Image (spheres, grey):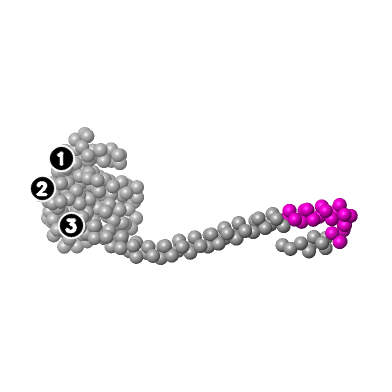
């Protein structure tokens, strides 16, 4: 699922270098997505869901692993206008990002798109945000569905992959069998030629007669 989220980011923004990513909470999927995005040059900001960034929290651990800052949750809204992507999985009992906050942030972004990934159950981001212009909201169900479609596409390719493997395997073994058969024959022909040549020399047959007899040995 985390890789699906990253591919969606790339589909919306293209290269992610320099893009600002807000990560709220530090669940497994959030951490994996943050690591993938950081590897692609994105700027990561982590927000602790404890209200303050306490040392030893999962959010603090994630921030340290990425060498970035960990902010208290109450500063999230002030960072929204700078965010290209928000990945949220807080586990809070209520939505952390109401539509009004996202609308206000978008007004400050002057129409630039924002990608919201809601990994929380219950949801961190109000579903009405998807109705805002240039706001792309995906939740876990959406990402699971995309992942399932990708799996089906790969499964449809399996028969063709098996066919290619079978063809290549047959070609390989045909070549191997040919080389296995040819090599002993070459060694046998060389041995026979050497023996015959030695015996003919002992018999005093040299020069053109010897060459003629050598050519008569079957290959």
Residue at position x 51%, y 62% in the image: 170
Q: What kind of element bears circle 2?
A: loop
**Residue 10 drawn above or below residue 73:** below
Q: Quadrant of residue 114?
A: bottom left
Relative depth, front residue between 131 and 195: 195
**Residue 50 drawn above or below residue 125:** above
Q: Which residue is mark 3?
A: 107
Among numbered discs 1 and 3, the one appearing first in the sequence: 1
Dominant secondary structure of the residues highlighted in magenta in the image: helix
**Residue 46, position in %: x, y?**
23, 43
Question: Which stretch did the figure color magenta?
Answer: 190-210
From where the camera sits, is residue 6 visible?
A: no
**Residue 135 drawn above or below residue 62:** below
**Residue 219, position in %: x, y?**
72, 62
Residue 199 belongs to the span the image colors magenta: yes
**Residue found farthest to the right:** 204
| Screen quadrant of the N terminus | bottom left
């Amino acid at each position: 699922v985390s890789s699906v989220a990253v591919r969606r980011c790339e589909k919306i923004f293209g290269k992610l270098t320099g893009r600002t990513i807000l990560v709220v909470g530090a669940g497994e999927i959030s951490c994996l997505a943050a690591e993938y995005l950081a590897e692609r040059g994105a700027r990561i900001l982590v927000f602790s869901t404890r209200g303050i960034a306490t040392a030893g929290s999962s959010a603090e651990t994630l921030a340290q692993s990425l060498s970035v800052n960990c902010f208290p949750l109450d500063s999230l809204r002030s960072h929204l206008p700078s965010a290209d992507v928000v990945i949220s999985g807080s586990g809070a009992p209520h939505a952390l990002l109401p539509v009004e906050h996202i609308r206000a942030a978008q007004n400050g972004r002057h129409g630039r798109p924002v990608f919201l990934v809601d990994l929380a159950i219950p949801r961190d981001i109000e579903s009405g945000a998807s109705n805002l212009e240039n706001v792309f909201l995906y939740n876990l169900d959406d990402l699971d569905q995309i992942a399932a479609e990708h799996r089906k596409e790969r499964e449809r390719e399996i028969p063709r992959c098996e066919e290619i493997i079978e063809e290549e395997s047959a070609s390989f073994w045909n070549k191997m069998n040919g080389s296995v058969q040819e090599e002993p024959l070459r060694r046998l022909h060389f041995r026979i030629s050497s023996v015959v040549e030695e015996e003919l020399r002992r018999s005093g047959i040299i020069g053109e007669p010897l060459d003629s007899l050598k050519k008569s040995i079957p290959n």
